[in-house]
Image: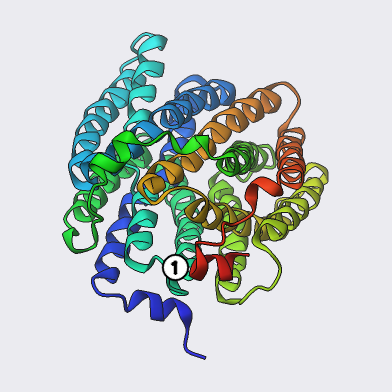
Amino acid sequence: MPNPYLHVLRTPHALPMVLAAFIGRLPLSMIGLGSVLLVQSETGSYGLGGAVAAVGAVATAISGPFIGRLADTHAQRRVLLGVLAIFVVSGVGFLFSVRADWPLWSVFLTAALAGASIPPVSSMIRVRWTHLLRGTPRLPTALAMESVVDEFVFIVGPVLVTFLSTTGHTTSGVVTAFTLAAVGSLLFAAQGHTEPPPAEHEHRRGASAMRVQGLRVLFVVGAAVGAILGSLEIGLVAFADEVGARSLSGLLIAGLAAGSMLAGIGWGTVHWKVPLRHRLVAALAVLTVLTVPLALISSYWVMLPVVVLAGIAVSPSLISAFTLAEVLVPRSAVTEAFTWIGTALALGVAVGASAAGKIVDSVGANASFLVATVAAGLAAIAVAFGQRCLHVPAEHAATAALAR
């Protein structure tokens, strides 16, 4: 059987789109951690660093659906370029506010503005795949591939930003992240062949995608996965610091993403017979169990393989959520639906990072990992009780046949 991922990448104009999106989304795994490292180096507090990162993530969560609805209505390129301009200006302001010892409120304000205007390349490319491959058996593979790329981003990004922030100037990591976001977004906006047409009249008359009950359940899943990633990002950095391996903290985060990426690659190549909503419950249950040992480990080199193992259920959870969202909401609201899940992820990251930062400062790094366990367990319960809402409509024949 030919490689399904190569089959997807042979779609006309797909490869330049994927490469541009990779560059554009790389900062997603760098800005939050880079901000934590920058603020911590200036103030000595992981709690404050986590709070700043959390404010940026909350702002991303609030603005995400609004940006997605604008993209559905007015086309991606126009919206993306406008958002990017705000992001660049606010990002520069954030750097100056931290380094120049401006009032603390200015640090939070500029972090919020930068977070609110992070270019939503990850959601937009999923919509482009939906536009290109809707109704074909290649679409679930393409969405799985995007989750794999997300995980690869979280392998490369944390290692890069940690290396830059801890071995060079403390602003190097954040500056690099802002630069990549600008370059990647511009390259992505230039990919006119794959851009879906705006659904202007249809979408303006339509209700919000969140009217769909199943999307509300998936919002909970996204928030839980975000809380897991946010808390582990802070907890793993603090853990490495506690055991005297701060410069290797990015490797722990990369290990988590590596486990998730490998699982996502396998997930996208299997023709499943188990309904997707059932697989989502199973993935979340496994994720709950695999995060428990993290709170008990005191050795860096023991933590590394355990983190890799814990990551194997992350990508399947996200793949399932995005695939279900695509078939549960009206076509004219797909961008908005994907950005709602992105919003949930950002909100979860904010809560998880903030909670983990406070626990690290007051108790220690290991205790902060329990935030991930609780989040995964609550999501599994929510999906188990929301099975009826996640039933795939029969009219989505091609995709539903693979998703169910």
Task: Point out residue 174 in the picture as x, y percentages from the top left corner.
Answer: 35, 38
> Relative to the observer, which residue lies in front, 40 or 356?
356
Q: In the picture provided, is 34 more to the left or to the right than 226?
A: left
Numbered disc total: 1
> Relative to the observer, which residue lies in front, 243 or 296?
296
Locate the C terminus by quadrant. Answer: bottom right
Residue at the (47%, 89%) spot, across then down: 2
Residue at the (49%, 19%) spot, across then down: 43
Task: Point out residue 58 in the picture as x, y percentages from the top left corner.
Answer: 48, 26
> Is residue 96 visible to us here?
yes
Classify residue 273 by image quadrant: bottom right
Q: Is residue 308 above or below residue 141?
A: above
> Relative to the observer, which residue lies in front, 234 or 263?
263
Residue at the (32%, 40%) spot, across then down: 203
Classify residue 222 by image quadrant: top right
Q: In the picture provided, is 4 more to the left or to the right than 91?
A: right
> Is residue 167 visible to us here?
no
Residue position marked by numbered label 1 in the rendering: 139
Q: In the picture provided, is 109 more to the left or to the right than 90?
A: right
Near mark 1 (Cα within 10 A), the count class, few <14, some 14-19 or many ≥20, is: many
Classify residue 16 by image quadrant: bottom left
Q: Amino acid at mark 1?
A: Leu
Task: Point out residue 213 in the picture as x, y percentages from the top left corner.
Answer: 59, 39
Task: Point out residue 316 in the picture as x, y percentages from the top left corner.
Answer: 62, 59
Q: Is residue 136 above or below residue 215?
A: below
Q: Give the structural element (helix, strand or loop) at label 1.
A: helix
